[in-house]
């Protein structure tokens, strides 16, 4: 077992990303799909900060990490407002039932 | 194995297990709890990478903000009194193929790329530097993100209110 380095953090980020992708694709409930999106964003952020620590030796990656967190918060707020609106209209948050725009 | 390695494996195991609970559990409350501990684990990873300010931000915004928001979404959109707290899954086979492919490509690239061997020093406090950079080099992105947050706040309040015409 080798010493923990950049590779380990990248592998952790990759696995988290794939788990988030799995949740986004398979879940039927819109709120759990949003949870998957948050997992993907966290995985990307781990990569930013791992590169900032091991390759860049600077703090720019961490600045991007802060911006990513802020934009994720804004996105989650708007997405949840939309989900609640869908629930009010259709009494359901299942994504396969919200298909009134499909042809 | 140094204590750093042991810490990494413990935190990574907690993170991945919680993320697994979030993805594979059928109960939406278990999903949210798994996500909670996954966020805690990611904050621990940030600490191990020397990003103390980001770890605190992660706890404040993700655990204190986004997760509570998601729980609100769960509570307001499920029939709590009924037995509707389950969430079904769709398209298991295509999803497994796509995710397996993406995982294989990512891991293969990580494995194949010759990362430079870096001798990193001990982590230093970052909060002062981040604050300085926000007011100097990153002033324009900072302002843009402020406006974006305001717009998202107004938009979410407008979309989410009852009887929006």
Image: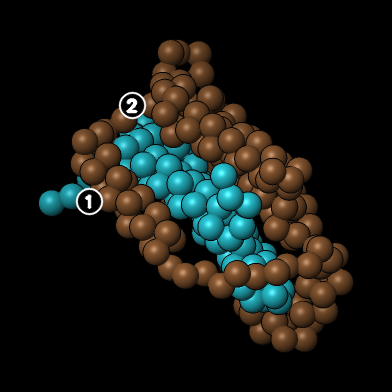
Figure quadrant of residue B57: bottom right
Which chain is brown in the rendering? B
Residue A42 x, y percent position in the rendering: 56, 53
Which residue is denoted by mark 2 in the rendering? B88
Figure quadrant of residue A86: top left
Of all chains, the one bearing label 2 is: B
Q: Is residue A47 above or below residue B103?
A: below
Which residue is denoted by mark 1 in the rendering? A101
Real-space CA distance between mark 2 and mark 1, rounded to the nearest whole angstrom: 22 Å
Which chain is cyan in the rendering? A
* Residue found at the far left of this picture: A103
Residue at 71% across / 76% down in the picture?
Answer: A58
Q: Is residue B162 left or right of residue A92?
A: right
Marker count (numbered): 2
Figure quadrant of residue B152: bottom right
Closer mark to the observer between disc 2 and disc 1: 2
Q: Is residue B160 left or right of residue B121?
A: left
């Amino acid at each position: 077992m080798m010493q923990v380095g950049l590779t380990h953090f990248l592998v952790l980020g990759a696995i988290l990303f794939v788990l988030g992708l799995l949740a986004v694709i398979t879940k039927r409930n819109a709120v759990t799909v949003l949870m998957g999106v948050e997992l993907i964003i966290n995985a990307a952020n781990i990569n930013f900060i791992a590169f900032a620590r091991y390759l860049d030796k600077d703090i720019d990656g961490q600045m991007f990490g802060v911006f990513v967190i802020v934009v994720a918060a804004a996105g989650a707020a708007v997405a949840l407002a939309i989900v609640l609106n869908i629930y009010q209209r259709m009494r359901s948050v299942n994504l396969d039932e919200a298909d009134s725009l499909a042809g | 194995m140094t204590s750093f390695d042991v810490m990494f494996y413990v935190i990574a195991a907690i993170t991945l297990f919680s993320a697994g609970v979030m993805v594979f559990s059928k109960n939406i409350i278990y999903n949210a709890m798994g996500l909670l501990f996954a966020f805690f684990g990611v904050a621990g990873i940030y600490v191990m990478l020397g990003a103390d300010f980001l770890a605190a931000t992660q706890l404040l915004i993700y655990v204190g903000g986004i997760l509570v928001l998601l729980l609100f979404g769960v509570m307001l959109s499920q029939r709590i009194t009924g037995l509707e707290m389950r969430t079904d899954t769709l398209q298991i086979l295509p999803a497994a193929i796509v995710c397996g492919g993406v995982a294989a490509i990512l891991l293969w690239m990580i494995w194949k790329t010759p990362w430079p061997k870096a001798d990193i020093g001990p982590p230093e406090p970052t909060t002062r530097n981040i604050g300085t950079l926000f007011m100097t080099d990153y002033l324009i992105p900072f302002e843009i993100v402020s406006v974006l947050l305001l717009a998202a706040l107004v938009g979410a309040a407008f979309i989410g209110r009852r009887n929006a015409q």
